[in-house]
Amino acid sequence: MAKLRAADFYYGAVLSNLVNKGICPMLVLDGIDRQVYKCTTHDDHFLLFLKYRSAPNNTKSVGYQSWHFVLSPNDTTELREYITQDTKLSVGLICGGKKLSDSEYAILHKNEITTILGLGKGTITISRKNPVEYHISIGRGKTQNIIINTDRIC
């Protein structure tokens, strides 16, 4: 009997979503805490680097959720290599919910990842208070955020 890892459910959900949107993913790198896919659409292709957190951080604010993603030194090295290549890059942050069906994912584009890596941060904390956007703090105060629409697919 083949055992399924928790990660299989999270990555599988994103893959199902991509396929349903007409995007064809192909696994190119598998790891314990991340996976990388080459994705093809009818007129383009891109790399998708996926990481997941199985549950949100504990917060006291009603309606506010956040997830903390650690970028290992290997993750950072890989991402820097992908950035230097002449290819489109997206990073998918799978944000687990209390129930699997409450999970969601945010897509960061190459320029946003470049900004985050340029700060020398080994973590990404993404938050959402309203249904239309995620925020990633890149400095002190609430005005220095990367804002990502929740409807991005890739």
Image (cartoon, rainbow, N blue to C red):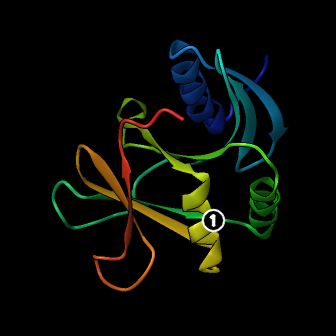
Identify the residue under disc 1.
114
Q: Does 138 sit above or below residue 98? A: below
Figure check: 78 above or below 139: above
User: Residue 71: image x %, image y %?
Assistant: 67, 65
Image coordinates of residue 133 in percent, x first then y, are 30, 50
Residue at screen point 15% across, 58% down: 62
- Rendered-image quadrant of the C terminus: top right
> Label 1 is placed on what type of residue?
Thr
Viewport quadrant of the N terminus = top right
Q: Residues within 10 Å of mark 1 (few under 14, many from 20)?
A: some
> What residue is shown at x 56% (from left), y 34% (from top)?
10
Q: Residue 68 at x, y = what percent?
A: 49, 63
Q: Is residue 58 left or right of residue 24?
A: left
Give the camera-side residue of 125 and 119. 119
Give the quadrant of residue 123. bottom right
Element at label 1: helix
Horizontal side of residue 27 vs 61, given as left or right: right
